[in-house]
Image: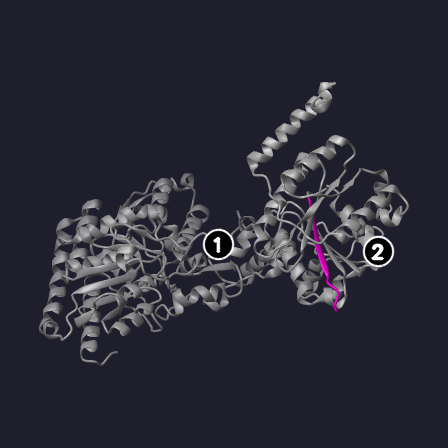
Amino acid sequence: MSIALKNTTLDECFGGDYAWSEQQRVACAIGGVYTALAIERVLPIMHSGPGCQGNINGVLASTNGGQNADSFLESVIPSTNFCEADVVFGGQERLRRLVEDSVKYYDADLFVITDGCTSEIVGDDIEEIANDYRGTDTKVVHAALPGFKGNNVWGHSQILHAIIDQYLPSAEEAKSISKNPKQVNVFGVVPFYDTFWVATLEKLEELLRDIGFEPNIIYGRDKGLAAVDKIPAAGFNLLLSPWIDLDVVKKLEEKYETPFFHYSAMPIGPSETGRFIREITEYAGTDRIAAEAYIKKQEDRYYYYLNHSLRWIYTCRVQPREFFINSSATQALSLTRYLVNDLGFIPRQIFINEDVPESEHERILADFHDLDWKGASDIEVIFTADGGLCDQYVKRSDTSFRKTVILGTTWDELTAKTSRIPFVPVSAPYGDVIVGQKTYFGYDGGLALMQDIFNDAAAKGMGTVN
Amino acid sequence: MAKKLKQIAIYGKGGIGKSTTTSNLSAALSDMGYKVMQFGCDPKADSTNTLRDGTYIPTVLDLLREKGTVKAHDAIFQGYNGIYCVEAGGPAPGVGCAGRGIITAVQLLKQQNAFEELDLDYVIYDVLGDVVCGGFAVPIREGIAEHVFTVSSSDFMAVYAANNLFKGIKQYSNRGGALLGGVIANSISNDYQRAIIDDFVEKTNTQVMQYVPRSITVTQSELSGKTTIEGAPTSKQATIYRELAKRVDEHATSKTPEPLDSAQLQDWASKWADQLLAIESGEVRGEAAAI
């Protein structure tokens, strides 16, 4: 477990008195298979133990907004169910037969052989099996996903690197592909782990189209390998996260000479969405006047809805104006910018729990300081792999008058109930509910988040929700 | 009162004569009237060959692979003088995990109380001695063997492997693991070889259990698929193995060794290299230098 602190320390937070309480907010590296499953008609073939898929399914899918994979349900994913005999004798030959049979019986466009801890420890060579299909019409790539190397975010990265390195054309082959200056590949979203990924990407696609781009998104409905195949043709890659997929867009820059535009947050609400549109327009040199017209139209609509409920908001018995966040770096940053810049809330403590590499901390902290708020440089961020720290911090904090809202996972809902303060789920595990088309992205997303915060605050104030 | 089962692990670098020594020890203890099991913990699965006229037996892991489960008694075969022979077995070279194979095989027999049911006096584990991973340390962990003996020649690589083993023993020593009984010095045919081993055991806080010279009798017996005890019972070499068995039988208290660290081992080796060079070039050292 790595705890890295920037402008605050655990001792400062907890007075030297804290116990670790691990609550699962990420899955092991095998969670990366959900990135494969998010690309239509891509089938993972798992060389891992019985239960490995079930374990990642809980936190990333079923209790994360009632999600499941679409093209291939989790229950039909081929697996060697790596057991003791495979540990002792090696399971490579069983995997070879499983891949042969999978290729025969499944109608998939791409097969991704993945492994796990045990098969990696005993040295089974999944690359050698994937190579059996090199030069054939059957597309097979491989990605090692040992849990001891990282969590599902790391696993997500391994899947993307496998596709870029093994499936996409080489730099030499791609030279004949003509670039489409308007085409923008979108990266930075970890499908499934980001509970709102489906709707967020749909809305982002709409927005990019509305301001004159041709977005190319590989995950979700009606995308699949057709979208993956278009990756080398993009005019530029768009990265919407502080650190996730930064390695991916850098690799694409190196391989296909595709530059990337890095915007650290997924925009929520008018300030961020407007800023994002202005910056990407400037970066790409597209029509600024059209972009400003789009921003004005969307902002008018946003403020209409806000004004439409303003009296109710001001008369709400519980007036949240501070917040705790316990979430991923992308989500925490996106939420913070909206809550501070648009709603005028003050951050109390932010916990970033996806075990961000230490080399990225400084940059992420700088992103948090980039706020329209004079106290921004004092904002407190804890980078941790222990999602349970937030619970202890909140319970030791003054949360009287219910002025503080918690934005986190379904685990944090328990903390909010105990402290009787407003709560909004924003990340995995989101809860045992259907997330559907919900997203906090963009102008409508800002309104949706504002509504969720005040609705829960009002319900707790009236005593209708414990 | 139930008799106490004595469990011994014999380690040593591959090819050092470990299985030969173990099989002769088993045969000699059996001749002394004890009920003995020899448990080969090497993926090569040839530890017990000379107890069974040079034949191989199905290994625990072979049976596991074929049937999915193993009844302990299906993996136990009798050899010379009724000695129970078991081979853990393992994967083909280059695949799987031999260490896990040993863990699996040892646990399988232990869980089924095979040792108690056979009313054994001795279980002797013959283990590949480089202790490259936790699996090869299983026999020295808590609840398996109590005493470890290591077979070593005076060659540096054998001593190096023995020293590594000592590190493993020390690692587990405060957690109820096996302790070191001593070194069985193998292929010791002259004084300087004896002196090297004597010096090593002194430095590492242990003892020599027996000096076993290189002998053609052993080779002759092995080529006819037998131990020296069985094939040449009246030979001088058989007497040496019987003496070893007697000492092992009398041995009661093992100790935690003090392995040399890398720098110490290197210094120790350099010192001996100098001495051997001096012997070769006829330089006279020590007391004789004054003559």
Front of the two marks 2 and 1: 2
What's the magenta region?
A: B1-12
Res. A335 visible in picture: no
The subunit carrying tag 1 is: A
Residue in front for this viewpoint, A440 or A174: A440
Classify the position of the C terminus of chain B by image quarter.
top right
Amino acid on which disc 1 is placed: Pro
The subunit carrying tag 2 is: B
Is residue B6 located in the magenta-colored stretch of the structure? yes
Amino acid on which disc 2 is placed: Met
Residue in front for this viewpoint, B165 or A311: B165
Which residue position holds label 2?
A: B32
Where is residue B165? Give x, y as percent: 63, 45
Q: Is residue B276 left or right of residue A386?
A: right
Q: Are there few (<14), some (14-19), or many (20+) residues within 10 Å of tag 1?
A: many
- On screen, residue A392 above or below A112: below
Residue in front for this viewpoint, B230 or A373: B230
* Residue at disc 1, secondary structure: loop
Where is residue A138? Give x, y as percent: 51, 54
Q: What is the CA distance from the residue labelled 2 to the residue labelled 1?
A: 52 Å
